[in-house]
Amino acid sequence: MSATDPAKAAPSLDGILETALYVDDLDIAKTFYADVIGFAEIFSDIRMASFSVGDDRVLLLFKRGASAQAVEAPGGGMIPPHDGSGPIHIAFAIADRDFPAWETYFDRHGIEIEGRTDWPHGGHSVYFRDPDGHLLEFASRRLWSKK
């Protein structure tokens, strides 16, 4: 049977809700994502912080090692342990018209753009790093377009 067989098909998903990064200094990371990138903080404690990234998407920042043990969830239940190391990559979508403004903004804030890419379908990307060395990308939504 193939994956297109209704009996074998996975139920539908609505997209990615949360993306997590692991950071060495939670306060420095929070300042970067709130004050420099402009994300609104939703929640924060000594272990983690969450930020709104448009609509219903959330960026989670976990202090490295602070979630290596199971944690009791506020509403009941347990959150299994997780952790990560090394530089991670995340792309955030921006409108094509906003690239020049972001590049000027990065320059004013001393953020080095490490790379620029023009994609075959017309999308554009700029790459830079956060304080923990994670590779961040601001990209056109059409980067993955098949049109």
Image: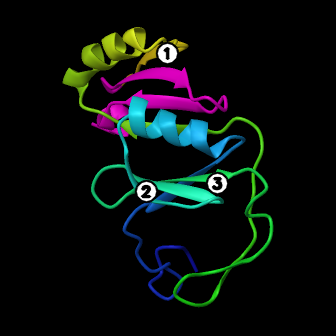
The answer to whether 86 appears left or right of 100 in the picture is right
Write down the region rendered in magenta.
Answer: 121-147
Whether the residues at callouts 3 and 2 have beta carbons within 8 Å, the answer is: no
The answer to whether 72 appears left or right of 96 in the picture is right
The answer to whether 121 appears left or right of 87 in the picture is left
Residue 75 highlighted magenta (yes or no): no
- The residue labelled by disc 1 is 111
Q: Amino acid at mark 2?
A: Val
Location of the N terminus by quadrant is bottom right
Q: Secondary structure at mark 1?
A: loop
Q: Which mark is residue 62?
A: 3
Q: In the rendering, at what x and y percent does residue 109 appear?
A: 43, 15
Q: Which mark is residue 58?
A: 2
- In front: 125, or 55? 55
Location of the C terminus by quadrant is top left
Q: Amino acid at mark 1?
A: Ile
Crowd rating for badge 3 (residues with CA inside 10 Å; few <14, some 14–19, many 20+): many
In the picture shown, does residue 119 fall above or below 88? above
Q: Secondary structure at mark 2?
A: strand
Where residue 27 sits, quadrant-wise, is top right
Between marks 2 and 1, how big is the CA–CA gap? 23 Å
Where residue 117 sits, quadrant-wise, is top left
Q: In the rendering, at what x and y percent does residue 59 appear?
A: 48, 52
Sequence-wise first label, 2 or 1:
2
Q: Which mark is residue 24?
A: none
